[in-house]
């Protein structure tokens, strides 16, 4: 087995949750999301973010607006829709449950051999 593949899959599994969480803070530009995801070592491949944002928009979870920029072309800023906030709230509940469950399992020192 390849450890890098497993690590990538683990990150991908929580990417959507992290992206929605970042957007939930307020209007955000894609490159700022990318920077935060990269610095947190969540984003491994840059080409993953834009297709994800498109899927989230088509699902009605995020919306965007174009904002003029003094330093180049207009920028697309993303916001969470009401449906997106409800979706994020549910994912947050799932994250809390999974985090607790995983913590319980990995901290259990009673190994049955």
Image (cartoon, grey):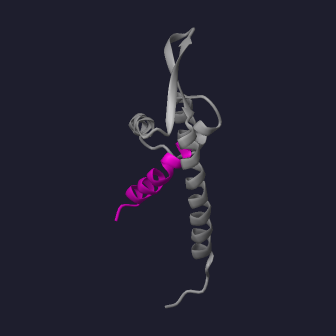
Q: Which residue lies furthest to the top in this view?
A: 70
Q: Residue furthest right?
A: 25
Q: Measured along the vertical axis of the image, is residue 71 above or below residue 18?
A: above
Q: Measured along the vertical axis of the image, is residue 11 above or below residue 77?
A: below
Q: How many marks?
A: 0
| Residue in front for this viewpoint, 56 or 11 | 56
Residue at position x 62%, y 61% from top? Answer: 96
Q: Is residue 47 left or right of residue 11?
A: left
Residue at position x 53%, y 42% from top? Answer: 83
Q: Looking at the figure, which quarter contains the N terminus? A: bottom left
Prevailing secondary structure of the magenta residues:
helix
Give residue 27's quadrant in the image.
top right
Residue at position x 60%, y 86% from top? Answer: 110
| Residue in front for this viewpoint, 4 or 90 | 90
| Residue in front for this viewpoint, 99 or 7 | 99
- Magenta span contains residue 11: yes
Q: Give residue 11's position: percent from left, percent from top.
A: 48, 52
Q: Give residue 90's position: percent from left, percent from top.
A: 57, 54
Residue at position x 60%, y 59% from top? Answer: 93
Q: In this view, does 46 lie to the left or right of 90?
A: left
| Residue in front for this viewpoint, 24 or 40 | 24
Q: Residue furthest front?
A: 82
- Magenta span contains residue 6: yes
Q: Which residue lies furthest to the left in this view?
A: 1
Q: Which portion, as a residue range, is magenta?
A: 1-20
Q: Give residue 39's position: percent from left, percent from top.
A: 57, 40
């Amino acid at each position: 087995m390849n450890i890098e593949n497993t690590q990538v899959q683990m990150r991908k599994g929580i990417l959507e949750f992290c992206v929605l969480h970042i957007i939930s803070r307020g209007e955000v530009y894609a490159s700022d999301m990318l920077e935060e995801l990269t610095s947190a070592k969540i984003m491994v491949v840059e080409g993953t973010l834009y297709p994800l944002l498109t899927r989230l928009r088509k699902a009605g979870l995020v919306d965007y607006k174009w904002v003029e920029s003094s330093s180049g072309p207009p920028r697309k800023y993303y916001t969470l829709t009401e449906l997106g906030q409800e979706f994020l709230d549910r994912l947050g509940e799932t994250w809390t449950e999974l985090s607790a469950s995983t913590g319980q399992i990995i901290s259990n020192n009673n190994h049955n051999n």
